[in-house]
Image (cartoon, rainbow, N blue to C red):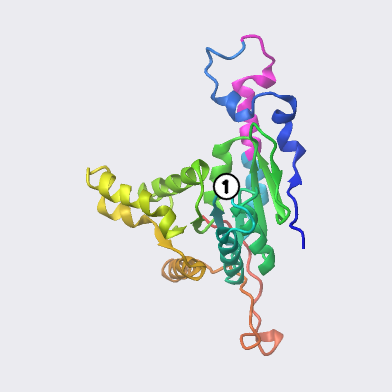
Amino acid sequence: MAEKQPQDNPTLNVAQRTRTATEDERLLQSPAEAPQAQDFTRSDPWRVFRIMGEFVEGFDNLARIGPAVTIFGSARTPADHPEYAAARETARLLGEAGFGIITGGGPGIMEAANRGARDADVLSIGCNIELPFEQGINPYVDVAINFRYFFVRKTMFVKYAEAFIIFPGGFGTLDELFEAMTLIQTGKVRDFPVVLVGTAYWKGLLDWIRDTLLAEGKISPEDVDLVTVTDSPEEAVRAIVECYEHNCSTTGRVDHRKKKQTVEETPASPANTPAEPEKGDAQ
């Protein structure tokens, strides 16, 4: 059966189609280089309102999705690659454990993760970003949210996830990895597992962290243990489930997951079925 093709995203591709700068590029432009004569809607004060609007839209769409896990990885991973299959299987297992799936909404590993969410029949979310080139949304996304500012989008990835799973990827993937490690190191997020999938791929980076950063005192010994590394989708999911359940039991937080039940686990009568809990923010 032919693979589904990415869906066009014209709303997000305005800059590419009009050959103009993206909103992020305009925001970060030096005032000395910015055109002096411009209407108010192109000014920094106006951009503040656009940024506020993106936060509002993101919060409005994601505030009640329930527990979810964000999965990162290369957009260039083809569908016949083992990493694609591993990401799809990881997302499926997470879905069966009661977690929704959040990705950047693009192709490659993101598509695989959203596809795995569909396999498990759980919520599949894609947070797309405006780029200087044409950007589509993969066909396995149920809830698509478009962002023009990277930092707003990155806030959503962390705020509404219980954990990160990171597959091999490029600069964007590394950006998310180190942002998560910084937030954990500085106590901005707690009980937040970061799992790297692909021991061979991540070995060089982790060796450098130990042999250079730690050896020169740039980080503390405990910072080396901020991530879990594995080649197994099952182990990746287990690390997240155990952390989530332990955190629920020690803090008294309600477990909001909706796990699929097997025949043996199915309650004997409706009277034994607990009321569906309110979904709430994950972080």
Q: Is residue 202 visible?
A: yes
- Dividing the picture into quarters, in which one does residue 199 lie? bottom left
Closer-to-camera residue (246/19):
19
Quadrant location of the N terminus in the rendered image: bottom right
Find residue 154 and report its horizontal and vertical position in percent.
Answer: 54, 43
Q: Is residue 250 left or right of residue 69?
A: left
Residues 244 and 281: in front is: 244
Q: Nearer the viewer, residue 23 or 110?
A: 110
Disc 1 residue type (three-letter): Met
In the current view of this chain or complex, which residue is farthest to the left?
Answer: 216
Do we see residue 190 in this rendering?
A: no
Residue 198 drawn above or below residue 178: below
Q: Residue at x 70, y 30 (%)?
A: 16
Q: Residue furthest top?
A: 37
Residue 103, image x and y in percent? 60, 52
Q: Where, by quadrant of the figure, is residue 279 drawn?
A: bottom right
Task: Give the magenta part as a residue range.
Answer: 36-54
For this view, does 136 lie left or right of residue 196? right
Please, what secondary structure does the residue beneath circle 1 have? helix
Circle 1 residues within 10 Å: few <14, some 14–19, many ≥20: some
20 left or right of 34? Answer: right
Residue depicted at 61% across the width and 59% down the height: 101
Residue 168 % position (x, y) = 50, 52
Tell me which residue sits at (70%, 36%) in the image.
Answer: 134
Label count reads 1
The residue indicated by pointer 1 is: 156
Residue occupying the point 57% across, 71% down: 97
Q: Is residue 6 left or right of residue 74?
A: right
Instruction: State whether the magenta stretch is mostly helix, strand or loop.
Output: helix
Residue 8 colored in magenta in the image: no
